[in-house]
Amino acid sequence: MLNSVQLPAAFAQVFRPYPSVYVAHNVEADSAFESAERAKGTIERFLFRREAQYLEHYEQHLAHNAVAVWTFAEADRFGFGRAVSERAFVLPLVTGWDAPAARTGEPDQDLQHDLGLIGTWSWRPNRLGLDWFLAEVVPHLPEDMTIAIAGQMDGVPTVSHPGVRFVGRVPDARAFVTESAVVPLISRGGTGVQLKSLETFELGMPCVATQASLRGIEAIPDNCSAADDPAEFARLLVNKVAKVRAGDRQRLDGSVFHRAQKVRLMRVMRNVLAGLAPASAADGPSLPPDLTIHEGGRS
């Protein structure tokens, strides 16, 4: 198993003779082209376009030479060309085989902030969402709302809202999320499934999400509201936080979402693996013994 696009591309001559499966977490080239379009300077735009061209070449090569392509969003199934889409399958995703353990404790004692956001903000697609949230959504939020932002970041932005805190890396990401009253899911582009969205749903947390944050997720929990307009996004956050402050935690049993995702995942995997099995296999589906799996993309 070779992670990311770059590693199997660098050693393509070693693995080319063997059958492989390409697992596309997202379409990296599309994300790089998108970053180029939103770049602020000529040099940055040039570098992203250069990266996108290399990534497109590598991804197309890996996808076209694979016996199957596995993606996590329907749109990505067509991201490598119509011919490849016939060998591409969409897998529902979970963040781990076992559902996250339910948090226990007295109501409201574990709440540390109204809104909690966590991510690798140094990755450009994630930073685009954070910049949108801070510039477009936060100005609509009341000044008494507390907003904690955790994760690695290059250059902390200047924000006038008094409730915003940048807390850097945290020792326990899931604990940080569950210490929030409401979780904003703020992706504004990119491809693939957002792992932050999956984890929020698996933890049963109330949230407000952009449509991009819900990409590739078939069943949206009842305590998740969607909006792309900044003012509406802020209004939904204010309403949900007010309910939590009034005693309605709005939390669901996240294991229900996790279990449903896993059932769909296994159903697709059974069909996919059966299709990859040799036709003469007498003992049921089996993978070729020399099968290599390449994992491309980030989420």
Image (tube, rainbow, N blue to C red):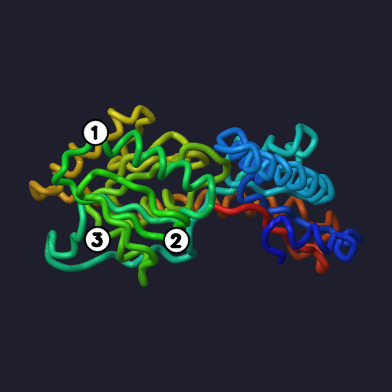
Asked whether residue 285 is in view, the answer is no
Q: What element carries label 1?
A: helix
Residue 151 marker: none
Amino acid carrying mark 1 in the image: His
Disc 3/disc 2 C-alpha distance (Å): 19 Å
Evaluate if marks 1 and 3 touch, with contact meaning CB atoms under 8 Å apart. no
Identity of the residue drawn at 17% across and 51% down = 249
Amino acid carrying mark 2 in the image: Gln
Can you give x and y, in whole percent of width and height, for residue 213 in the image? Answer: 44, 41
Viewer-nearest of discs 3 and 2:
2
Amino acid carrying mark 3 in the image: Glu
Picture layout, residue 77 above or below residue 284: above
Crowding near the residue tagged with mark 3, few <14, some 14–19, many ≥20 C-alpha atoms within 10 Å: many
Identity of the residue drawn at 12% across and 60% down = 107
Q: Which of 195/146 is in front?
A: 146
Crowding near the residue tagged with mark 1, few <14, some 14–19, many ≥20 C-alpha atoms within 10 Å: some
Residue lying farthest left? 246
Residue 140 marker: 1
Residue lying farthest bottom? 171
Q: Which of 295/229 is in front?
A: 229
Can you give x and y, in whole percent of width and height, for residue 230 in the image? Answer: 33, 30
Q: In which quarter of the image is residue 32?
A: top right
Evaluate if marks 2 and 1 touch, with contact meaning CB atoms under 8 Å apart. no
Point out the image quarter for the N terminus. Answer: bottom right
Q: Name the residue under label 2.
A: 152
Disc 1/disc 3 C-alpha distance (Å): 23 Å
Residue lying farthest front? 42
